[in-house]
Image (spheres, grey):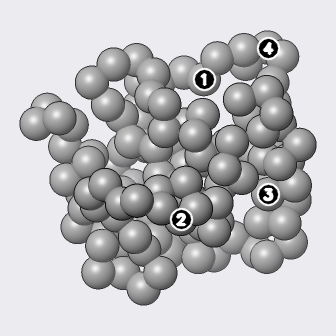
Amino acid sequence: YESCAVRDRILQMADFDGVDVGGFIPNYFEVKGRSHFCLIPAGTSPWTNQLYESIHCGCIPVILSDEYEVAFQHIVEWQHFSLKLPESMVGPELYAFLQSIPVEVLREMKAEVDAHSCWF
């Protein structure tokens, strides 16, 4: 992961209120399930399990990759239950953006995540 600079910037967000990032934990899926957003950074391959785990757990995925393209775009309306943002946004700007999303929009996106989770 040394070549994945976005991951280093995500780790720097650990001091922000309500943000949990870092190593392996025994209740990983439980934590994901309690979260509003799950950050999905670019990895070492063109896809990541974190995206599908997040949806399965009911967490709104925030895809942080300039290159990643989600599957089945012509069938699945990803914009209803996920966010795709540029890697350059990671840091205080991303934190402020996510906090600014109205509660009603969060509810709608969460309902869409839950409606689509059976497919992941």
Helix, strand or loop under label 1: loop
- Asked if the residue at tag 3 contacts the one at tag 2, i.e. Cβ–Cβ closer than 8 Å, the answer is no
Q: Residue at x 26, y 48 (%)?
A: 7
* Residue mark closest to the camera, 1 vs 2: 2
**Amino acid of disc 1:** Val
- Asked whether residue 52 appears in the rendered view, the answer is yes
Residue position marked by numbered label 1 in the rendering: 70
Q: Name the disc covering residue 74, or none.
A: 4
Residue at 48%, 31% in the rendered image: 49
Q: Position of residue 48 (x, y in %)?
A: 45, 28
- Separation of residues labelled 1 and 4 (CA atoms): 10 Å
Q: Which residue is mark 2?
A: 31
Q: Secondary structure at mark 3?
A: helix
Residue position marked by numbered label 3 in the rendering: 110
Q: Give the quarter of the figure containing the C terminus.
A: top right
Q: Residue at x 82, y 33 (%)?
A: 118
Residue 20, quarter of the rendered image: bottom left
Q: How far from the left and from the top, in percent, is residue 74?
A: 79, 14
Distance, label 1 to label 2, CA atoms, is 24 Å
Q: Residue at x 46, y 44 (%)?
A: 40
Q: Nearer the viewer, residue 34 or 96?
A: 34
Residue reaching furthest to the left: 2
- Specify which label sits upstream in the sequence, 1 or 2: 2
Residue 65 lies, with reference to residue 32, above or below; the image says above
Query: Mark 2 and mark 3: span between their CA atoms?
Result: 15 Å
Q: CA distance from mark 4 to mark 3?
A: 21 Å
**Cα–Cα span, label 3 and label 1:** 18 Å
